Image (spheres, rainbow, N blue to C red):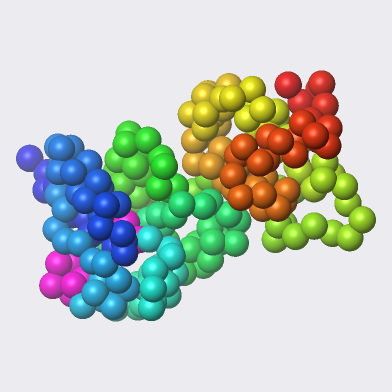
């Protein structure tokens, strides 16, 4: 028998931590060796626990997940780190890559996707969403219309959002990962300057952002 994958969960939301603990506890071949509610606590625990995988929340009070990731790798007390966040924007993903993370998954990912990420990273792979080549820092260059701000794939995602499809359904329709769709949705909300999917759909319908070719 092989040793289980030893996992440390770092998140300042107890509900998120407990949900992940339950997920990994119910999965054969994985073992949660600790929980941390802050970056400081993670740095204190890692030398004692020596986890194989750390699931790292990006947005925390005090040390951010990105800062904690850098510090943990410098300490040499962890195997690999996977970023965990509500939003999958390009800036955070790139920052985690540069900090040394081996993967990045959204908090609303399916259970199987989170488990798969842990297994793949433990095996030496990297697990990041497929970011579109046309994505920049997410700022709107002067003079661009709302429609022009969106990439081709983002228009397709928005078109399917207007039909009421969920992220998993959109991912299946476009034959990409759910993580990639979460990234696109976050980018769409940012570019359209709205705070949720309903507002994005309203903008798409009111301003004619979506054309017939996007469906």
Residue 55: within the magenta? yes
Residue stretch in magenta: 45-56
Along the viewing direction, whichever of 100 and 43 lies nearer the viewer:
43
User: Residue 202, can we see it?
Assistant: yes
- Looking at the image, residue 122 sits to the left or right of residue 34; the answer is right
- Asked where in the image residue 90 lies, by quadrant, the reply is bottom right
- Asked where in the image residue 201 lies, by quadrant, the reply is top right
Expressed as whole percent of the image width and height from the top left, the position of residue 61 reads: 39, 73
Q: Residue at x 80, y 34 (%)?
A: 206
- Asked where in the image residue 54 lies, by quadrant, the reply is bottom left
Q: Residue at x 14, y 58 (%)?
A: 33
Relative to 72, does residue 84 appear above or below in the rendering? above
- Looking at the image, residue 103 sits to the left or right of residue 184; the answer is left
Looking at the rendered image, the quarter that the C terminus falls into is top right
Q: Residue furthest left?
A: 1
Expressed as whole percent of the image width and height from the top left, the position of residue 95 reads: 53, 66
Expressed as whole percent of the image width and height from the top left, the position of residue 196 reads: 59, 44
Q: Residue at x 21, y 55 (%)?
A: 7
Relative to 9, does residue 132 appear above or below in the rendering? above
Looking at the rendered image, the quarter that the N terminus falls into is top left
Q: How many marks?
A: 0
Along the viewing direction, whichever of 3 and 17 lies nearer the viewer:
17
User: Residue 122, can we see it?
Assistant: no
Expressed as whole percent of the image width and height from the top left, the position of residue 82 reads: 37, 56
Residue 159: within the magenta? no
Q: Residue at x 37, y 35 (%)?
A: 110
Relative to 86, does residue 165 appear above or below in the rendering? above
Q: Residue furthest right?
A: 143
């Amino acid at each position: 028998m092989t040793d289980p994958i030893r996992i440390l969960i770092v998140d300042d939301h107890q509900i998120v931590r407990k949900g992940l603990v339950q997920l990994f506890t119910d999965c054969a071949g994985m073992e949660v060796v600790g929980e941390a509610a802050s970056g400081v606590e993670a740095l204190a625990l890692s030398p004692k626990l020596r986890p194989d995988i750390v699931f790292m929340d990006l947005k925390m009070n005090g040390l951010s997940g990105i800062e904690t990731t850098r510090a943990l790798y410098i300490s040499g007390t962890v195997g690999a780190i996977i970023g965990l966040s509500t939003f999958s924007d390009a800036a955070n993903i790139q920052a985690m890559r540069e900090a040394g993370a081996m993967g990045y998954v959204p908090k609303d990912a399916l259970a199987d996707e989170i488990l798969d990420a842990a297994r793949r990273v433990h095996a030496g792979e990297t697990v990041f969403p497929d970011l579109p080549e046309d994505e920049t820092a997410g700022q709107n260059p002067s003079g661009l219309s709302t429609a022009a701000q969106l990439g081709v794939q983002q228009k397709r995602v928005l078109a399917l959002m207007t039909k009421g499809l969920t992220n998993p359904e959109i991912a299946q329709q476009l034959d990409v990962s759910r993580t990639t769709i979460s990234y696109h949705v976050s980018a769409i909300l940012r570019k359209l300057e709205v705070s949720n999917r309903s507002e994005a759909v309203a903008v798409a319908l009111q301003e004619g952002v979506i054309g017939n070719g996007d469906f």
